[in-house]
Amino acid sequence: MQETLQLITQCIQQKEQIHHTVVNAGKIVALQKDLELRQSVNEADLINADGQAVIWASNVLGKPLKERVAGIDLFTNLLALAKEKKYKVYLLGAKQEVLNELIKTIKNTYGSEIIAGQHHGYFSTEEEAELVENISKSGANMLFVAMSSPKKEIFLHKHKKALKAVNFIMGVGGSFDVISGKTKRAPLWMQDSGLEWFYRFIQEPRRMWKRYLIGNTKFISLVLKEKLESKDEAN
């Protein structure tokens, strides 16, 4: 986390751009078939592991990662950084009522001066170009996009060059819902134990069962396959 924050601060100070993304078990499974998603992840400038399953896999495969960097934790750290450094943020995504509650929370916690602009996540393809132009001209140092995967990854990859005036661009998934109070995040002990996915499953079983139960099984099989192939190559 600290290395990530230092790198982002550096890029803002030097007026460069970093396209950030995260990977978790579900996304790694999805990008096996979704080539557009795979390209958006592979061509990002900075990738963090958001999910204990990815940390587990890195250890199994003999390439251990230092720690999990959850997207929502990075998001809140960057809001604090914006307050400290007087950076500006643009918030894109979620329903307008959720966005309104999020902005209230951010203003109360970090101050209204950090907000460069905002827009809900329900816009048409025809509206995209104008929206991207408005974001680019907003004076934002950081853009946070709260959409589902792979929509957010593809949006950022597609408009990366047009958003070059924004130093840091990042997809934050359901973070707006959590910070606004619409949904609850798992207790810290479940986060640390790698059970945050199960907490979300309990909250929305109909929507999440396929993503987690089937997706996690596929992820484990991918890791084991990679492990076996690595052994064969070593032999």
Image: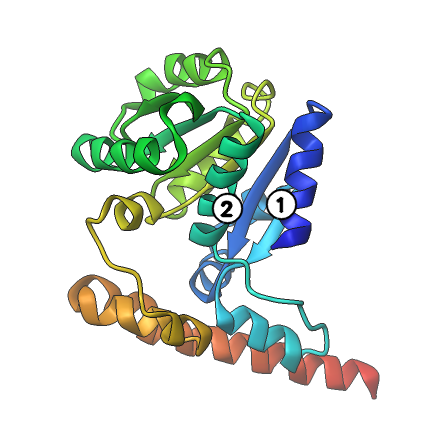
Mark 2 highlights which residue? 77
Q: Quadrant of residue 12?
A: top right
How many numbered marks does the figure carry?
A: 2
Q: Which residue is at 28% across, 23% downward?
A: 124
Q: Amino acid at mark 2?
A: Asn
User: Does residue 169 appear to the left or right of 63 in the view shown?
Assistant: left
Viewer-closest of 96 and 224: 96
- Residue drawn at point x = 54 percent, y = 26 percent: 87
Viewer-side residue, 70 vs 2:
2
- Which residue bears the numbered disc 1? 5
Mark 1 residue element: helix
Q: Secondary structure at mark 2?
A: helix
Q: Position of residue 142 (x, y in %)?
A: 52, 29
Are discs 1 and 2 less than 8 Å apart at CB?
A: yes
Q: Nearer the viewer, residue 187 or 166?
A: 187
Identify whether 159 is placed above or below 232: above
- x and y percentages locating residue 187 in the rendered image: 32, 70
Query: Is 225 left, or right, of 188 in this rendering?
Result: right
